[in-house]
Image (cartoon, grey):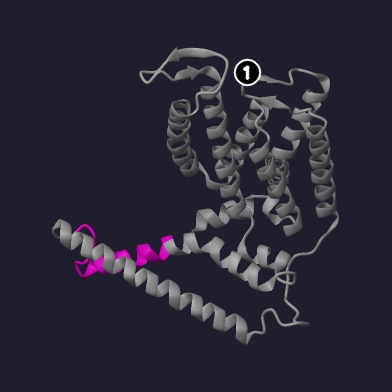
Amino acid sequence: MRQEAARKLKDSFSSYHPTVNMLYFVLVIGFSMFFMHPVCLCISFLCAFSYAVYLGGKKTLKSGLSFMLPMLIVTALINPVFNHAGGTILLYLHDGNPLTLESILYGIAAAGMLICVINWFSCYNAVMTSDKFVYLFGRIIPALSLILSMALRFVPRFKEQIKVISNAQRCIGRDVSNGSIWMRAYNGIRILSIMVTWALENAIETADSMKSRGYGLPGRTAFSIYRFDKRDLCALLYILLCGGYIIIGSMLDGLRFRYFPTIKGVGAEPFAISLFIVYFALCFMPIILNVKEDRKWKSIQSKI
């Protein structure tokens, strides 16, 4: 817990206004989902994975590699089995369907896109806490924002609580590691039943608590620690300029790329290169801010 708190304090981008954080993740996640150009996928993966490792440390590096490499290989192998489109035929399968180069590369690109989105969402969960989400949408959609906030934090709380319940059951000999197979299954069902009961009770208590505090009523005010300053304004303008340039460039086919029927896309053209540079500058923004703050902090420490 102390290490996680230290990382959150170390991350400079997390200290920016929630509007800046939300706009950034909306753009990078949206671009990662729609831009299938190999260069864009490489940029998105590099930046998302680097930021995820910065936030999570070595544990994220190990778990990320053990998860991403198998997904990349499996998707690249499975997609050609069901997708036989493409003009470059490498060989014919035993059922007579062709194995094409385009289907293999599209499978790799699809797996890369999925990995990028998952990494960006892991960064989003670390930066966009529930209080930030409620701050942004509490007045516009109070009921929905509360539900979404509870849903986003449900998984980590569920994991923590199930460890507590499992440890308590282990102390009285009712853990999933004790007894025969049927007894282990029975103990697992018992733990799951306790977990579901806790989740339902917690949801009811949260709803009653928010209702008693007048959440969602018209005219209700809320305390907030977030203030929009010049630093946030500069970051917001930077994100808007980069995002606007990329959107306009994509509308002008500056990032076009296709996999079927043959591989064809924009090459090393000046306009495309400028889009790649701006896209990298946008995605790498949190790392740039963190490196800048780390250097500033080290400079201050050296003067003490």
- What secondary structure is marked by label 1? loop
Horizontal and vertical percent for residue 245? 83, 37
Note whether 216 is above or below 92 in the view shown. below
Residue ID at (57%, 54%): 6
Residue ID at (61%, 42%): 51
Which of 79 and 222 lies nearest the eye of the viewer? 79
Report the number of discs. 1
Horizontal and vertical percent for residue 3? 51, 53
Q: Main secondary structure of the magenta part?
A: helix
Horizontal and vertical percent for residue 296? 73, 44
Residue projecting furthest to the left:
180
Which of 109 and 288 lies nearest the eye of the viewer? 109
Apparent side of residue 230 relative to residue 58 in the rendered image (left or right): right
Q: Which residue type does callout 1 highlight?
A: Thr
Which of 108 and 86 lies nearest the eye of the viewer? 86
Chain part drawn in magenta: 159-177
In the rendered structure, does residue 174 fall within the stretch colored magenta? yes
Local crowd at mark 1 within 10 Å, few (<14), some, or many (≥20)?
A: some
Horizontal and vertical percent for residue 197? 38, 74
Note whether 88 is above or below 73 in the view shown. above
Q: Quadrant of residue 18?
A: bottom right
Residue ID at (62%, 51%): 124
Apparent side of residue 52 relative to residue 17 in the rendered image (left or right): left
Note whether 156 is above or below 238 in the view shown. below
Q: Quadrant of residue 263?
A: top right
Residue ID at (68%, 73%): 142
Apparent side of residue 228 relative to residue 6 in the rendered image (left or right): right
Q: Which residue is mark 1?
A: 262
Q: Quadrant of residue 273?
A: top right
In the rendered structure, does residue 97 fall within the stretch colored magenta? no
Residue 240 makes an appearance in the image: yes
